[in-house]
Amino acid sequence: MDVTTGNGRPPFISLSALFLKFLRFGFLAFGGPVAQIAMLRQALVEEERWIDRARFNRLLAILQVLPGPEAHELCVHFGIIARGRIGGLLAGLGFMLPGLLLMLLAGWIYVTWIAGHIIWNGPLLGIQIAVLAIILRAVFRIGEHILADRLTWAIALGSALVTLADTPFWLPLLAGGAIYALSHRPVAAVAAAALTLVAAAWFRFAPDAGTVLAITREPSTIAALFIAGLKGGLLTFGGAYTAIPYVRADTVGRGWLSDATFLDGIALAGVLPAPLVIFATFVGYVAGGLTGALAITAGMFLPAFAFSLIFYERLEVLIEHPALHRVLEGVAAAVVGIIGATFLQLGSAAWPRLSSPLLAVILFGIALAAAWRLKGAWVTPAILASGALAGTALPL
C-alpha cells in the first residue's frame, strides 16, 4: 500500500533495516516530543525526503488532534509509507523499545535499591518538586494553543473544578465537547453545562454514587493495569502530559502506589530517550512487577499503533468535518483543566511531606522559571538533576 501523496518517496528499505533505523531514532529520542518530532522531520523529510514538507505538516496536524504520543505515531506512519502496515509495526516497536527497556531497568533499580531507603528521601523529594514545576509549565504550554476564547477557558476551569470534586473522568470530557460543539446554539450549550453541574453534584453527594465510579480499591491485576494504560492511551490529547490524570486515577487512586512514587516515574520518563508516556511502564512495574509493566505499556501504546495501522485513511477524511473540530477543541479544553486539577492534587499530596515549605516553594519557583524560560533537550534533565541536588543539600 502506498500512502504517500507528496512528491517525496522513501527509498526501498528492508524490514530489518527499517526496524534498525527506527531503533536508532529511539536511542536518540531525548528531550520530549518537540525534539523527537524535529529529529524525525530533519532525517526523513529534509534529508531523505520520504515525504514533502506540506504532507508532513498535514500529517502532524492530524496526529496532534488524535490521542497518543505524536512522535511515536509519526514513526508508525513513516513505517507504513515505507513498507506497509508490517513496516509501521516494526517502526513503532523500534522507536519505543529503547525507552521501554531502560524504564524496566529503572523500575527494577527503584523497587530494589531506592524505594524505602531513607537516604534517598531528600533527593527524591527535590525531584518531585521539580516535576511539579514541569507539569505546571506543561499546563500553560498546552493551554496557550487550546484556550483560544472565553468559552474554552470556562470549559477548562469547569473541568478542573468537577475533577477536584472526584467526578468520573469521562464527565468533563463529554461536557467540554458538547458545550463547545453547541456554542452556536446558546440554549443547548447552557443546558449541557447545567446537566454537567447536576451530574457532578450527584456523583459528589449521592449516597450510592460510588457504585458508578470506575475507580475502586481492588488489588492490581494484569487486566486492570492494561485497562489503565489503554485509558491513558485513548485520552492522550494534545501531548503526553494529558495521560497523567487518567493513569494516576487508575493506579494511585486504587492505592497501588503513592503520589510520590508516581512523580518519581514521571521524572524518570523525562530523562530517558522515549515518549513521556513511558512513565506508565514504571507505574506498572511498581504496581505489578514485570508483567504489570508490560501490560500497562501495551495498553498505553495500543491506540498509537491502531490509529495509524487500522484507521488512518478513514480518520483523515473524518477529521475534516467541522463539527468534529468543535468537539475535539472542547475536549482538549477540558483536558487542560483536568491536568491543572491533577497538578493541584499532586501538590497537595506532596505538601504534608515537607519539613521546610518555604525552601520547597523557592525551589519550585526556580524550577518553574527555568522550565518557562529555557529551551532545549537538556532543560528537563537539568531541572530534575538540580532538584535532586537541592533535595540532598537542603532540608526540604
Image (spheres, grey):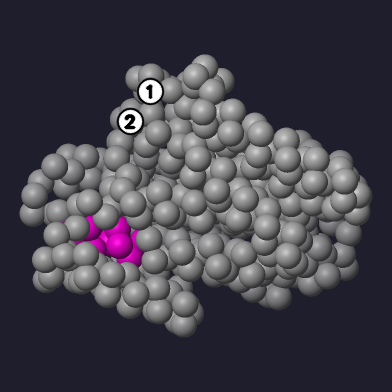
Q: Which mark is residue 291?
A: none
Quadrant in which residue 55 is drawn: bottom right
Height in image: 133 above or below 105? below
Give the mark nearest the N terminus, 1 or 2.
1
Q: Closest to the observer: 173 or 52?
A: 173
Residue nearer the viewer, 154 or 187? 187
Q: Main secondary structure of the magenta part?
A: helix
Q: Would you say the residues marked 1 and 2 are in contact, meaning their CB atoms lie under 8 Å apart?
A: yes
Residue at x 40%, y 34% (from the top left corner): 253
Residue 145 location in percent, x, y? 68, 68
**Camera sees residue 319:** no
Instruction: Please tell me whether residue 99 belongs to the stretch shown in magenta.
Output: no
Q: Quadrant of the N terminus?
A: top right
Q: Quadrant of residue 384?
A: bottom left
Q: What is the x, y in percent for residue 364?
A: 32, 70
The amino acid on which the numbered mark 1 sits, given as a three-letter code, is Arg
Label 2 is placed on what type of residue?
A: Gly
Give the residue displayed 88% in from the left and 68% down from the top.
7
Instruction: Give the quadrant of the C terminus.
Output: bottom left
| Residue 128 highlighted magenta (yes or no) | yes
Who's the residue at 73% across and 40% down the image? 194
Is residue 321 at least partly visible in the picture? Answer: yes
Front residue of 351 and 165 = 165
Q: Which of the numbered marks, if any, corresponds to residue 217?
A: 1
Tell me the SS state at disc 2. loop
Residue 171, given in percent of the width and then of the height, sits at: 64, 36
47 left or right of 299 in image: right
Q: CA distance from mark 1 to mark 2?
A: 6 Å
**Mark 2 neighbour class, 10 Å CA radius: few under 14, some 14 to 19, many 20 or more:** some
Q: How many numbered discs? A: 2
| Tag of residue 255 | 2
Q: For the magenta stretch, what is the residue range?
A: 122-131
